Image (tube, grey):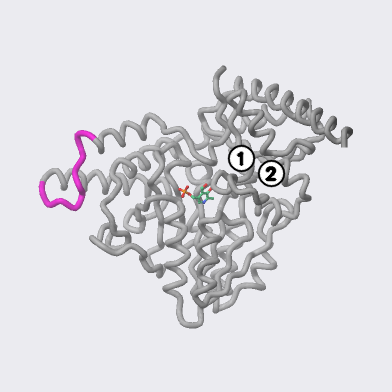
Amino acid sequence: MQEIYYDNSATTQVCQEALAAATLAMTSEYGNPSSVHGRGAAAFRLLNSARTTLARAMGVPAEELYFTSCGTESNNTAVYGAALSGGKRAKRLLISSIEHPSVEQAAKYLMNKGFSLEFIPVDRQGVLDLGALRQQLNEEVALVSVMHVNNETGTIQPLRQVGAAVRELAPEAVFHVDAVQSFARLPLELKAWQADACTISGHKIHAPKGVAALWLRGACRVQSLLRGGGQEKNFRSGTENMPGILALSAAAEEACTKMEQNERQISAVRKRLLAGLQAELPDLRINSPDNAAAHILNISFLGARSEVLLHYLEQSQLYVSSGSACTSKSSKGSHVLEAMQLPPDVVDSALRFSFSRFNTLEEAERAVSIIVQAVQEIRCIMGRNKKKR
Ligand code: PLP
């Protein structure tokens, strides 16, 4: 039995390009970019070249890009850094109600430090309520953080309108975009969004875990959190993770140059899976909007609890996720689906399928029969149990 991996929003398989780049940095080019001898200088050149490549893929100037250890660190840095840098009056933090915990928990922590936190509501599709945002914005806002693509549903946020509202009504606020789930899958339009800061993460785009980046617009004020040897222009001390950084830049270049081609492949897989499931299980409920990012599909199979279904599927080596991977080990329901005001039975039976360019149409067909059989068996058992009671 061959595995089918539909959990690419949790993490991805490392691609050959990233593996080769990491291997280079761990073997022949193992220098520390801060060393003043030749080996250090060679590493420094590789670091600069990786930064230039990644910056090009993100559409930002290389000197505004900082490497970090993970998306969580980049998000924490943006939230804490923006809050610390705001003026005396700027004590309000605005984040969407469906942000990743690495934004939400960082902002919540600041509530004990003299900041107030307000959530921007979303509608039933998970799209930000722009009217509510406009009412919440004023000059006391230090930070607005809104993700590009939601990690549970694939909902794409109207960032042009968000950015325009921020610039009009809270011009001093830092506008941060968490693009962990969109980078290398959809174009980043940081200029058009009028964003100040943006997070991306390596292991979501076929680079290894433990490397990420934070872009900060030149004029944007965000204080650094790590102090020490002064790496990353004194913004993020710590010896650079050269294998990770070279791998991230190689993976980004590969994914971004083939973005449209990959998107077509992923859309075809999504379409085939969805059509097959709808034909056999017409009562399924799609929680992702029609115009969601192609690589994330959230579906509820009413009557089949997501944890039970997930483990059923696992027996056939079909790997999916219930809610986001980072929170799915907690017993709490998805805060994203709850913010979308979906009923409890829909939330309890929601599964996330997330695709990569390595998924095939043949897999999608196999996945349909595995899922249909599992849902029917679980419903049958649940029905019998109900009758017994
Ligand atoms: N932001 C989003 C939207 C995510 O989906 C994730 C991880 O799932 C993160 C941030 C955190 O990234 P990392 O796992 O690199 O810390």
Secondary structure state at the residue bearing disc 2: loop
Q: Which quadrant does the C terminus fall into? A: top right
Q: Is residue 88 shown left or right of residue 376?
A: left
Q: Report if the CB atoms under discs 2 and 1 are less than 8 Å apart.
A: yes
Q: Which mark is drawn over residue 96? A: none
| Residue 276 visible to an observer of this rendering | no
Q: Quadrant of residue 255?
A: top left
CA–CA distance in space, label 2 to label 1? 8 Å
Q: Is residue 282 above or below residue 174?
A: above
Say which residue label 2 marks. Answer: 288
**N-term mark: 2 or 1:** 2
Q: Which residue is mark 1?
A: 296
Q: Is residue 74 above or below residue 170?
A: above
Can residue 103 be spotted in the picture? Answer: yes
Residues drawn in magenta: 27-37
Crowd band around label 1 with a 10 angstrom C-alpha radius: few (<14), some (14–19), many (20+): many
